[in-house]
Image: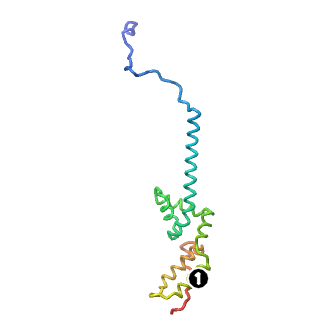
Amino acid sequence: MNDNEKESISPITPPEGFTTKVSAKTPVDTEKEIKRKAERVRAQKRQIKYQQWLLERQFPKAYIENGLNATKAYMELKAPKSYKTATVEGSKLIAQPNIKRAIEDLLPKEEETMRILSDVYAAPREKELSYKELHKFWETDLKLRGKLKDKAQNEVNIGIFGSNQ
């Protein structure tokens, strides 16, 4: 390319209102903006803590109402993305000592169970309770008290004594 050709090439001009200047500086947050962002983050953390606290307060009751099923209890209280998530999160909640205590406090004590049973046996009824119904009651009671741990131990013989009136 010779000097004549260089001069004949005209530079491209940008359209009106368009600036070609590029700033090398990045926008800097003002002190006010930094404080606002920090407050938003703190508010989000408070909200998460509150939701967790509320879940921990409601979980024991939901756990008992769902037949000692942590997955169903968690799904009732929250909308997990998957069943697997509910299973994992429910297990985590059950493992917490404060939740274990809350569940134990909600369960009837052994004396209370015996009083209820004696009332059930003594109460007049149209239909006699079946062995299956009585067995299910005792099995549930033992599970709630932690006497039946897993399926292998569910083969515990539960003797039911009573008089057929």
In depth, the one of 153 and 63 nearer the eye is 63
Q: How many marks?
A: 1
Q: Position of residue 89 (x, y in %)?
A: 53, 59
- The image quadrant of residue 57 is bottom right
Q: Secondary structure at mark 1?
A: helix
Residue beneath the point at 38% across and 17% down: 13
When the figure is inspected, residue 128 is found, relative to residue 87, above or below; the finding is below
In depth, the one of 129 and 24 nearer the eye is 129
Residue under label 1 = 115
- The image quadrant of residue 152 is bottom right
Residue beneath the point at 51% across and 79% down: 136
In depth, the one of 89 and 60 nearer the eye is 60
When the figure is inspected, residue 96 is found, relative to residue 144, above or below; the finding is above
Q: Position of residue 59 (x, y in %)?
A: 54, 63
- The image quadrant of residue 145 is bottom right
Residue beneath the point at 40% across and 7% down: 3
Image color mode: rainbow
Q: Position of residue 68 (x, y in %)?
A: 53, 69
Residue beneath the point at 50% across and 64% down: 71
Farthest residue, direction top: 4
Q: Quadrant of the N terminus?
A: top left
Q: Inspect the image, locate mark 1, and give the three-letter code of the amino acid beneath it.
A: Arg
**Residue count near mark 1 (Cα–Cα under 10 Å), binned few <14, some 14–19, many ≥20:** few
Q: Is residue 17 left or right of residue 23?
A: left
Q: Position of residue 30 (x, y in %)?
A: 57, 32
